[in-house]
């Protein structure tokens, strides 16, 4: 696809374990930042790539996602989009989105998918034309966000929504590099899952080389991430929860992770 051919994505670590993500279209010069954990890290990334920031998309109001927003917006003049629900909390939003809204960032049509649970305002951003999504602190590789503002049933329904909306070949970016700890926990839920075993091995190899484990793909996560697999009979069986609802199984997995 012509559009994909001119797209480049740059991912880098901000703060301790937050990701910065830039999506750039060479033809139009459009550059999108997802969240701003740290302005300086983004400025450095923009300088290294030579890209000029045009849009900033915010996933949720937590400080480690918006801390650098004011400074980066001021220095670049980029237009900031974020959840309508946090319009009061995030002073720098230029435009707000609700569930299902489509916005245009240069050549990219970006869909806002509301995925509450970690926070009530949480938006996952999806760009179908380049098969890419940023799931903020909702979906991590081999994990999901801790449930702070919603409840566990709400989080399960948000993850189910991502399962419905994002095809297997979607490249998934997210807010944090938590995958190694997530892999250790996931293996306690499904020790015999061969796909999980090989992903855990890959993750440990990547981390020992100091490399990121993201992006992942929906296909990989469907096969390995216990939080996304709560509807699988094999997962219910592994937990001794045969016949229980997916939401109940998810709640058990999330509770175990909270106490791990
Ligand atoms: Zn968060
Ligand atoms: Fe976070």
Image (spheres, helix red, strand yellow):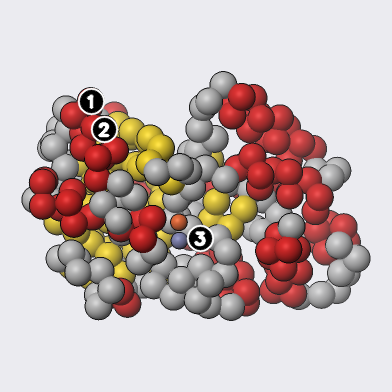
The label shown at residue 45 is 2
Q: Residue at x 87, y 69 (%)?
A: 241
Mark 2, Cα crowd under 10 Å, few <14 / some 14-19 / many 20+, is some
Residue 213 figure quarter: top right
Q: CA distance from mark 3 to mark 2?
A: 25 Å
Q: Tell me the SS state at disc 1.
A: helix
Camera-near label (3 vs 2) is 2
Mark 1, Cα crowd under 10 Å, few <14 / some 14-19 / many 20+, is few
Residue 19 position (above or below residue 205)? below
Give the image location of residue 5, x and y in percent. Answer: 29, 29
The label shown at residue 138 is 3
Q: Earlier in the sequence, mark 3 or mark 2?
A: 2
Camera-near label (1 vs 3) is 1
Q: What residue does disc 1 label? A: 48
Q: Nearer the viewer, residue 126 or 257?
A: 257
* Residue at the extreme top of the image, as rendered: 209
Residue 155 left/right relative to 17: right
Mark 3, Cα crowd under 10 Å, few <14 / some 14-19 / many 20+, is many
Give the image location of residue 43, x and y in percent. Answer: 21, 37
């Amino acid at each position: 696809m012509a559009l994909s051919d001119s797209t480049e994505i740059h991912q880098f670590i901000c703060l301790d374990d937050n990701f910065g993500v830039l999506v750039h279209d060479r033809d139009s010069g459009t550059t999108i930042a997802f969240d701003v954990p740290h302005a300086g890290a983004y400025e450095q990334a923009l300088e290294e790539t030579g890209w000029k920031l045009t849009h900033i998309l915010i996933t949720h109001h937590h400080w480690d996602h918006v801390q650098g927003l004011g400074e980066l917006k001021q220095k670049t003049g980029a237009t900031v989009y974020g959840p309508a629900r946090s319009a009061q909390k995030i002073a720098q939003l230029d435009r707000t989105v609700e569930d299902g809204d489509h916005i245009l960032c240069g050549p990219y049509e970006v869909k806002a998918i509301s995925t509450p649970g970690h926070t009530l305002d949480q938006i996952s951003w999806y760009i179908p034309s380049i098969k890419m999504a940023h799931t903020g602190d909702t979906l991590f590789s081999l994990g999901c966000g801790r449930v702070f503002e919603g409840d566990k049933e709400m989080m399960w329904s948000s993850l189910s929504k991502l399962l419905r909306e994002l095809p297997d070949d979607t490249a998934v970016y997210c807010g944090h590099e938590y995958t190694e700890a997530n892999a250790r926990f996931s293996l306690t839920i499904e020790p015999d899952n061969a796909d999980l075993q090989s992903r855990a091995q890959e993750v440990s190899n990547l981390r020992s080389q100091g490399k990121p484990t993201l992006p992942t793909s929906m296909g990989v996560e469907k096969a390995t991430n216990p939080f996304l697999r709560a509807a699988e009979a094999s997962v219910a069986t592994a937990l001794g929860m045969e016949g229980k609802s997916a939401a109940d199984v998810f709640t058990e997995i999330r509770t175990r992770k909270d106490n791990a």
